[in-house]
Image: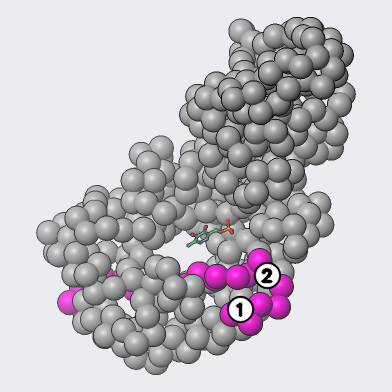
Amino acid sequence: MPTTALRARAEIDLGALRANVRALRARAKGAAVMAVVKSDAYGHGAIPCARAALEAGASWLGTATAEEALALRAAGLTGPVLCWLWVPGGPWRQAIEADIDVSLSGMWALREVTAAARAAGRVARVQLKADTGLGRNGCQPADWAELVAAALRAEDEGLVRVTGLWSHFACADEPGHPSITAQLDRFREMTAYAEERGVRPEVRHIANSPATLTLPETHFDLVRPGIAMYGVSPSPEIGTPADFGLRPVMTLSASLALVKRVPAGHGVSYSHHYVTPGETTLGLVPVGYGDGIPRHASGAGPVLLDGKWRTVAGRVAMDQFVVDLGGDEPPVGTEAVLFGPGDRGEPTAEDWAQACGTIAYEIVTRIGTRVPRVYVNASM
Ligand SMILES: Cc1ncc(COP(=O)(O)O)c(C=O)c1O
């Protein structure tokens, strides 16, 4: 426990994370789980979350960047890791030497990885990514034959081993969206094409959190949940975390820094977008957009303070915001809970997302490094 009071803290419940991974494994029986820990595990802390996910039975880790994958290795995590976002000149050789699977979406990447494999004198583990309809990263169907043929030639030369064939959904969080079956059909066609020509992947995968939770036909050999592992629903449209047996992992709180009585008509925070409607008390919550609190929460973000939901009054500033306490005078140091699992009456990350016009992914991921992560239930 810290010896001095913290201005703010993001409590990370690793027990909840482990239980979430177990719940996801139960939904995807027969498939392995890749714990997606990119972007510092959606703001929760990549290394502790990766360890907890593996303890709960995840067998792969997934990151966007090579640097994120190399950081997992530097922390001593030795199991399978895939990273998928590359630019020319990336650290291919370090990734190969660290036994990290790298994703290839085009010929330029295959050329770079084979050159690095030759230089390292090692076989690169590569996964071919198909654009089955997301229209983002991944190889277009029209270019797939060329990529598959070149990867097979590189396999014959002993430079690469194709360990995976994979893709990513555009609209898996929109039940019944026609792109889901279209992408699935294309994925089946593209993987079948590669396998008919001799690719022998260890894993074929396409399912993110919403697909893992609601579309069993998408599970193949492995599922790749991110947000669900952190106990947040991918979309309120498909259900709440509790509907899927998930529990939010992050609780963000701050220590009330000032309480003061002000008269009616008092402007609050920059630009005076809030003016007190009557004599009242104001509470100062010492976190702001410098900590990742969205400025879009101005006049809208909910906070549990002294047993009641309060609303951000006026603008969120870089380091602080104000709530109208309506005459209440909780002592300074009182805990203000911005979001958490919701079962102590506090708002959730989803409540913040709705208040700010964004998604809960962004709310948790953007919480900045100035907010210390405090890990609880770290041991099994
Ligand atoms: C390629 C890839 N796979 C899996 C995920 C995990 O997605 P989700 O957090 O919706 O489970 C992401 C996240 O955006 C991703 O980019």
Residue at x-position 68% and y-position 70%: 174
Mark 1 highlights which residue? Answer: 180
- The amino acid type, in three-letter code, at marker 1 is Ile
- 306 falls in the magenta region: no
- In the displayed structure, would residue 13 be above or below residue 154? above
Quadrant including the C terminus: top right
Q: Residue furthest front?
A: 265
Where does residue 3 sit, x and y in percent of width and height? 61, 8
- For the residue labelled by badge 2, is the local secondary structure a helix, a strand or a loop? loop
For residue 356, what is the image quadrant? Answer: top right
Where does residue 323 sit, x and y in percent of width and height? 74, 22
How did the renderer colour the structure?
one colour
Q: Residue furthest left?
A: 119
Check if mark 1's residue and mark 2's residue have beta carbons within 8 Å.
yes
- In the displayed structure, would residue 102 be above or below residue 312? below
Where does residue 98 sit, x and y in percent of width and height? 30, 51
Where does residue 142 sit, x and y in percent of width and height? 34, 87
CA–CA distance between discs 1 and 2? Answer: 9 Å
Magenta residues (range):
156-179
Say if disc 1 is inside 8 Å of ligand 1: no
From this viewpoint, is residue 37 visible? Answer: yes
Quadrant including the N terminus: top right
- For the residue labelled by badge 1, is the local secondary structure a helix, a strand or a loop? helix
Residue at x-position 49% and y-position 73%: 134
Q: Is residue 195 left or right of residue 354?
A: left
Residue at x-position 51% and y-position 32%: 368
Q: Mark number for residue 329?
A: none
> Who is closer to the viewer here, 298 or 16?
298
Mark 2 highlights which residue? Answer: 174
- The amino acid type, in three-letter code, at marker 2 is Glu
